[in-house]
Amino acid sequence: MKTPFQLEHRLGRRILRWVLSVALISGILLSTMQIILDAHRVSGELDDQAAQTMALVKDAATQAVFSIDIELAQQVVEGLFEQDAVRFANITHPDGEPLANQKRALKQPYFRPATDLIFGAERTYRSPLIRSADTQTTYGYLEIVYDTANVASRWLERASLTFISGIARAIILGLVLYLVYHLLLTRPLLRIIHSLTQVNPDHPDDRLLAVPKTHERDELGLWVNATNNLLVAIAENQQKHREAEDRVTRLSRYDNLTGLPSRETLLGFLNSAIEEDRRNKHILSVFCCGIDDFKSANDQHGYQTGDKILRVVAERLSEQRDGSHMIAGRLGSDQFVVIEQHLQDDYQAAATADWLLQIFSRPMRVDERQIFITGTIGVALFPADGTEADKLLQRAEQTMTLAKSAGRNQFQFYVASVDLQIRERKKLEQDLALALPGGQFHLVYQPQVNLESQRVIGAEALLRWEHPERGLVPPDEFIPLAELNGTIVEIGQWVLEQACWRAASWAAKGNPIRIAVNLSAVQLKQVNIVDEVLETLKRHAIPPGRLELEVTETSFMENLDDAIAKLKRLRNAGIYIAVDDFGTGYSSLTYLKRMPVQHLKIDKQFIHDLLTNEDDTRIANTIIDLGKSLNLSVIAEGVETEEQEFYLRQRGCQLAQGYYFSKPLLPEDFEKFVVSFHRKITAHNT
């Protein structure tokens, strides 16, 4: 609240009052002192005048007394009365007998009561009359009485003039001093105060104070400069405070890493977009996008590179498609959200989802390295899947999570059963954490047969989960979940331990066959995976050639150089490397030339319709021919009929496995199968 500037508050008036008061008091004191000194001087002059007068008439008065000349004495007295101040004159003999005298009444001016206090009403002077020839004899006395009214009148005139002039000088001096103060101090201060009132509190450095003229180097100039410095400092501090508030606001509304809107800001945008599309009767889509296995990318490339990947994705998502109305934001970690408005049907949302998948899968160059990533997208639509912003966003997230558990690099729309599936998946994830310590896992082994020799040369170890309530849980359900939450590392090590122990056990019984173990993408990204595999072989005393590690194409394409280096170490140790599900991923000749691979496994989806589907037959033939050209063994998965086995053998496929030979078996059953299978082959040949 500003205090109004009133006249009595001004410093100039206070200075004027003080200056005039001091000047008046000083003038009165000085004038009074001057008047007192003048009174003392006048009193002395009166005494001197009386002494002079008596000296002038003393000889004549002495002669009149000596000769007893009354006439002369009377002349002397009358001569004294020529002075207006003389009131009484008397010449007497030594015995007091008057020779001549004269008197007149005291004057009664108006000021006598005051001046009588200073000078007295009259002054009497008496002098003996002595002849110079005889100084020892007194012939008489001369007495003169002066009336002080005359000298008092003159003194009073001078005193009045002195007092009035003193007061006038004091007033003039006070006004001059006030004018000097006003010109040198109060007027510049008023101008400074006026300038201060013009200062904008929000931007105090916009109008700095002007230094008063002629005050550039004195205290006022210094004070103005100091005030200006303070205003500039305040402005800078306010600017920093505003910038800090803006940063805090931006941090609360926008993601610090990518600059995209945060969850709360997105919800605000989404609410507005829903209302707009509700009025226009349009469809709105919410895409929740997640980077596939981003944790592994952080582990392999480092968190700084991971942050750069997120920024690249954010820049791509911020791009606008022609004719689209989209807003992108970040939920956190590797999850992004895209909101698209004004859709006419679901097909437009599907087209946008395809476009978003392409954005994720486009190679990106980060820190001089080319990095490949993929994304999985959950899609929720307004108004079909919800009419509230938070519900739509939640359902898009749930759908993305469900889509990730089913695979990668795909999108999925929300359906009514998503909530139930999410709850079941969460329950399965909790049960999965208890499966390994609870002894619910076991391995089964599917024989691998050499098609030319018709001998069982190996077995693929396959993981099974016997759930205490649900029974046997399909691997397609829990393996992706284990890879997603990272428990596959511990489970995979357990599988390797069990498989190696079983291989050692069979070798001790005279059946030394090769064991194939699946190595997941998450395991391959572990820094110490090579050392763990070699230490496991050493613990069970198994030659490295008895172990085959199966890896998928997608598991090493995310970081090809790192994967190749690890697999080469394993191969150099003598371990066989096989590419599992070949033909379903990148199927690049470039990486096959660089990879230390010995076996290609044709995925069972191409074997299932072999001989009935031309495309699948052509793909299987191509893979077999590719293996021959690269001097790699080819293993066919999912062989179920005699015709398939015959065709593959005739085409030059070396190895096969599938239900035509045997389903996956428990260890004891596997041992019996090998004996029985070989016995049948021997009997058939004979």
Image (spheres, grey):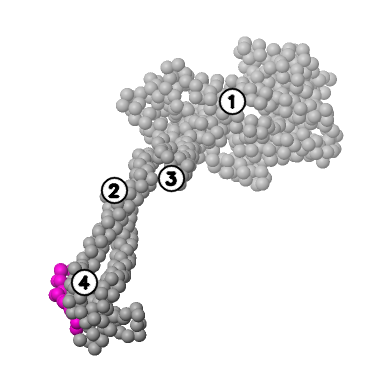
Say which mark, if any, is on residue 220: 3
**Residue visible at 63% across and 22% down in the picture:** 365
Measured from the top left, where is residue 192 in percent x and y?
Answer: 37, 43
Instruction: Count all numbered tags in the image, as a single digit.
Output: 4
Disc 3, SS: helix
Q: Given contact means CB atoms under 8 Å apart, are the residues at marks 1 and 3 in contact?
A: no
Mark nearest the camera among 4 and 3 is 4
Measured from the top left, where is residue 294 in percent x and y?
Answer: 61, 32
Q: Does 329 sit above or below residue 152?
A: above
Q: From the image, tell me which residue sits under label 2.
A: 4
The stretch drawn in magenta includes residue 112: yes
Measured from the top left, where is residue 396 in percent x and y?
Answer: 47, 32
**Residue visible at 68% across and 21% down in the picture:** 582
Segment colored magenta: 98-114
Say which mark, if any, is on residue 80: 4
Q: Given contact means CB atoms under 8 Å apart, are the residues at marks 3 and 2 in contact?
A: no
Measure the alpha-carbon separation of dots 1 and 2. Answer: 70 Å
